């Protein structure tokens, strides 16, 4: 927990960044570009929630996109069958995913390390099968289609019909902000410290009085909740829910974002998510070739950048003269105060 | 009755296919303490090597089998050197992520080269139907069963009788002690990958004529092989074979008598059952977290 | 009423009886040491007492509570702090964060309160930080406050681990070889710390191989050999006990 001394620098930077993000759709004419920005937001939110589980608690779940997909299906089914409003779907989808997560966490969290990973992978495959085969529920390979466009109403004051791409962009921005704040709170608070203690040394954590099962379940379920809600947004944005939302490629993509960006570091994860959604879409690299490049980058990152891009950037930043003066002035302040 | 026996034989061939992947995973886990998430994809590579040798180059079937096995032997060694060796001393989650990365590279690279549509590689044997004790059986299936079992027997003898094989077995029992005694852990690790991939090449050329091959066929195989390895007790080669055969037969019977949509779910269900009822089979090995 | 009461504790590993029907009683305010040759079951005994291993037979009572089948974290929260022989530490957390980790689970706020960062949580964090500063001062690690613990020397590790175990102000401190593998200066510091604490009323039960340390500071020594308790008493009686000397130096 940092002291108040030079908190204004990050604060000012965040505000500036937020202004830029709010202004972006106003200057970008190209709707496809805004779509890519939306997808980047979706992946940022997903990667951040995934990192709670993988980077902080150290549980290598391979079922994170499953919760995203389940959320998408929950929202799509609710919207098409009972025409429930967007906000309700968003929350219910989160709870459906979280409920599923707490049910499967009961057997899985008793498994150690790699067995946990394999177990969650199996779970992910089962849910894929269900999505493909239970046509009465999911529409099978024909998808659940015709999800309504969101309409947010708040009494007589707000009635926002989300229809244009930039509307969707702002909706995503709001959701992403909530996710960032939640993850930031979780990881920088005492909860985050407990998470890291589990990742660092489970046995020592037990001796420190940590109820491993409670904290692991908490991280897993909260991660699933976020993923499920983001899935609901995605269903309302793309107006459908397809089995692809559950695919193992998503798992791989997320793993790459985390491990190349910097696992366990929020900045790194966001960096990774931007790198691996915005850049390839922007350059219009064919999906299959993209996967080859992803795979190679993943291997290189694991081998040569154990701290990820964020680690590299931080190292460079520390060498810059500006950073040095900032750091030394900060130290002086501390001594004076 | 007739269909039951046919289903059983189907299940046996399926089980042997899983076993060829599972054996490699068990061996690799034993020697290198690494869980290879790309092993099923290596089977896929073997299948494509066979496809090229047999259908594209038009080599005779036995020659094509040997080509596939030999090429895969080399490829396995290479895979170990390039992908596995640099991260062998890192924690297990790095192993997992790295081999998953390798898996995705293999799948995508083969999709780029050969397209994503499934291919068939029928041999003249797959159409030859024999009458055995009143049952109609394709000759290819018999070849699969006999040759695969022979290859497992050869592996068994290798592990029991040769010095290298014994060292591998010892490694899976006590890795630290072996390193102290002076066993060359790195060379063994390369060799283990080479041997298990050679087996994959052989099995892939035997089985491919019965099924279709596609770049994405490996993922499901990897997972089912895991299920088999877990059922057999982690790192146990024989256990993995039994686990795989049980899995194959269960799957074939499920497909034949219950529903073909959820055969894959059977593997999962059985694995979870074993994980929950006998977790000590996995955890009992000590501190590695498996 | 004894603080810790171990009755007939037995632990077997695949035919090997690592701890064999051991009785131990520790009273409040004592400084007791557990000694014995390598592999005599000392660490295993600690693991059974603190819930890290499940005993095959016997009971452990802590202040009248039966803690035999309790989970390690529950036992820790009851006020029984332990350290590990392997010098476990959160390497990527800073020194002060290691210390904070030692107490924060004991302070009993809910996860929700933590996420909301309520005033109560901020106050608790403040208190914990103050206590951490005190203890860093006590063991002399203040200058390393914000260093990642992984950067410390082995001797500093041991001091940090010792201080971390003290963070929750435990009623009983179980230390597994606190003075092993560190240099003589550090050993002396560790000795002084233990004596100081004990004078201040803390109950300490520790495993140690260094006879000098044990003989110097303990009031009572318990000797384990091949899982059995073979002797118990003040340092002099142990020094003059042939069986103990044989167990230790004989073979
Ligand atoms: N988890 C375990 N599984 C199997 N055997 C074990 C286990 N832990 C300890 N042992 C065995 O139990 C016996 C007692 O070990 P323990 O670690 O308790 O000895 P110790 O007195 O602490 O020795 P040291 O002075 O070397 O620390 C040893 O023979 C050891 O090999
Ligand atoms: Mg010990």
Image: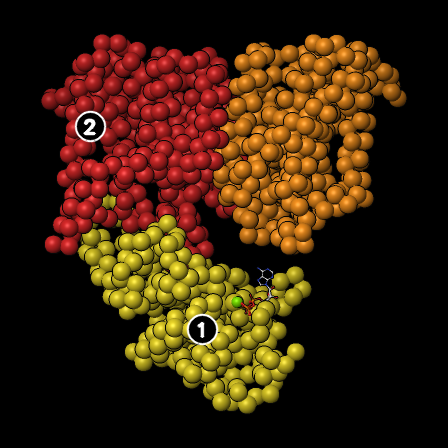
Relative image position of residue A75 (x, y in whole percent): 35, 23
Please say if A264 is above or below B1. Answer: below
Instruction: Report which colour depicts chain A.
Output: red
Around disc 2, counting alpha carbons within 10 Å, would you say few (fewer than 14), some (14 to 19), or many (20 or more)?
Answer: few
Relative image position of residue C17 (x, y in whole percent): 63, 68
Of badges 2 and 1, the one in the foreground is: 2
Secondary element under disc 1, as helix, strand or loop, is: strand
Identify the residue position indicated by label 2 in the image: A17
Residue at x 39%, y 27% (from the top left corner): A68
Secondary element under disc 2, as helix, strand or loop, is: helix
Residue at x 79%, y 11% (from the top left corner): B124
Q: Chain of mark 1?
A: C
Residue at x 43%, y 58% (from the top left corner): C88
Identify the residue position indicated by label 1 in the image: C206
Q: Chain of mark 2?
A: A
In the figure, the orange chain has which letter? B
Does mark 1 have its CB less than 8 Å from ligand 2? no
Q: Could you say which is closer to the camera, residue C189 or residue A51?
A: C189
Image quarter of residue B123? top right
Image quarter of residue A278? top left
Residue at x 65%, y 32% (from the top left corner): B77
In the figure, the yellow chain has which letter? C
Please say if C78 is above or below B238. Answer: below
Relative image position of residue B174 (x, y in whole percent): 65, 52
């Amino acid at each position: 927990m940092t002291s108040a001394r030079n908190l204004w620098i990050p604060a000012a930077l965040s505000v500036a960044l937020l202004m830029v993000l709010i202004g972006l759709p106003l200057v970008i004419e190209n709707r496809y570009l805004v779509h890519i920005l939306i997808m980047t937001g979706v992946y940022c939110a997903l990667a951040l929630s995934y990192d709670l589980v993988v980077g902080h608690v150290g549980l290598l779940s391979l079922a994170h996109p499953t919760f995203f997909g389940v959320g998408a299906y929950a929202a799509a089914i609710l919207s098409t069958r009972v025409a429930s409003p967007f906000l309700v779907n968003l929350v219910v989808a989160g709870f459906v995913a979280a409920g599923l997560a707490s049910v499967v966490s009961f057997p899985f969290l008793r498994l150690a390390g790699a067995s946990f990973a394999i177990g969650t992978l199996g779970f992910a495959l089962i849910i894929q099968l269900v999505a493909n085969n239970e046509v009465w529920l999911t529409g099978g390979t024909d998808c659940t289609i015709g999800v309504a466009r969101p309409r947010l109403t708040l009494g007589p004051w707000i009635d926002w019909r989300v229809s244009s791409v930039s509307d969707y962009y702002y909706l995503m921005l709001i959701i992403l902000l909530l996710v960032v704040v939640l993850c930031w709170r979780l990881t920088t608070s005492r909860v985050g410290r407990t998470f890291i203690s589990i990742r660092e040394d489970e046995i020592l954590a037990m001796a420190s009085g940590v109820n491993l099962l409670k904290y692991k379940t908490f991280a897993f379920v909260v991660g699933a909740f976020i993923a499920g809600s983001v899935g609901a947004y995605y269903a309302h944005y793309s107006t459908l829910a397809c089995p692809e939302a559950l695919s193992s490629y998503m798992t791989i993509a997320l793993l790459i974002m985390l491990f190349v960006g910097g696992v366990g570091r929020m900045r790194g994860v966001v960096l990774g998510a931007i790198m691996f959604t915005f850049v390839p879409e922007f350059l219009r690299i064919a999906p299959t070739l993209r996967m080859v490049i992803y795979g190679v980058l993943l291997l290189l990152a694991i081998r040569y950048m154990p701290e990820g891009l964020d680690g590299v950037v931080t190292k460079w930043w520390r060498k810059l003269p500006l950073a040095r003066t900032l750091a030394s002035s900060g130290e002086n302040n501390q001594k004076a105060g | 009755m007739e269909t039951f026996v046919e289903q059983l034989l189907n299940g046996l061939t399926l089980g042997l296919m899983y076993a060829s992947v599972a054996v490699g995973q068990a061996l690799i886990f034993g020697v290198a303490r690494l869980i290879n998430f790309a092993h099923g994809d290596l089977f896929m590579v073997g299948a494509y090597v066979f496809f090229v040798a047999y259908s594209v180059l038009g080599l005779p079937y036995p020659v094509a089998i040997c080509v596939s096995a030999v090429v895969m032997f080399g490829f396995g060694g290479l895979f170990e050197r390039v992908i596995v060796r640099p991260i062998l001393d890192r924690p297990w989650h790095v192993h997992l992520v790295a081999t998953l990365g390798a898996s995705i590279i293999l799948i995508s690279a083969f999709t780029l080269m050969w397209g994503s549509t499934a291919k068939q590689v029928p041999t003249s044997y797959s159409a030859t139907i024999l009458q055995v004790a009143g049952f109609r059986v394709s000759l290819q299936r018999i070849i699969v069963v006999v040759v695969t079992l022979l290859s497992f027997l050869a592996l068994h003898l290798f592990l029991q009788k040769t010095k290298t094989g014994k060292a591998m077995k010892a490694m899976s029992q006590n890795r630290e002690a072996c390193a102290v005694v002076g066993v060359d852990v790195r060379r063994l690790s390369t060799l283990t990958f080479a041997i298990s991939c050679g087996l994959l090449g052989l099995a892939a050329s035997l089985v491919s004529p019965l099924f279709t091959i596609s770049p994405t066929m490996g993922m499901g195989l990897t997972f089912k092989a895991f299920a088999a390895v877990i059922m057999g007790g982690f790192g146990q080669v024989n256990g993995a074979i039994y686990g795989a055969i049980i899995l194959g037969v269960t799957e074939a019977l499920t497909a034949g008598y219950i529903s073909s949509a959820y055969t894959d779910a059977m593997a999962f269900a059985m694995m979870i059952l074993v994980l929950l009822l006998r977790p000590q089979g996995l955890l009992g090995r000590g501190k590695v977290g498996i | 009423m004894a603080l810790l009461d171990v009755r007939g504790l037995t632990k077997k590993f695949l035919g090997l009886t690592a701890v064999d029907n051991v009785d131990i009683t520790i009273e409040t305010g004592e400084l007791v040491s557990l000694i014995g040759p390598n592999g005599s079951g000392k660490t295993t005994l600690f693991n059974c007492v603190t819930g890290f291993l499940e005993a095959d037979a016997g009971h452990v009572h802590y202040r009248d509570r039966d803690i035999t089948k309790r989970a390690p974290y529950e036992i820790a929260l009851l006020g029984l702090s332990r350290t590990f022989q392997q010098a476990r530490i959160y390497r990527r957390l800073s020194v002060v964060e290691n210390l904070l980790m030692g107490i924060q689970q004991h302070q009993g706020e809910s996860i929700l309160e933590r996420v909301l960062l309520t005033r109560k949580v901020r106050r608790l964090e403040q208190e914990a930080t103050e206590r951490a500063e005190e203890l860093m001062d006590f063991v002399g690690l203040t200058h390393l406050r914000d260093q990642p613990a992984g950067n410390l020397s082995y001797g500093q590790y041991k001091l940090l681990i010792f201080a971390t175990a003290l963070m929750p102000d435990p009623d009983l401190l179980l230390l597994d070889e606190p003075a092993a593998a560190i240099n003589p200066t550090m050993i002396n510091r560790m000795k002084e710390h233990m004596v100081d604490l004990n004078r201040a009323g803390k109950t300490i039960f520790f495993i140690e191989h260094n006879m000098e340390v044990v003989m110097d500071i303990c009031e009572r020594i318990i000797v384990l050999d091949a899982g059995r308790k073979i002797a118990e008493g003040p340092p002099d009686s142990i020094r003059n006990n042939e069986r103990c000397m044989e167990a230790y130096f004989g073979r």
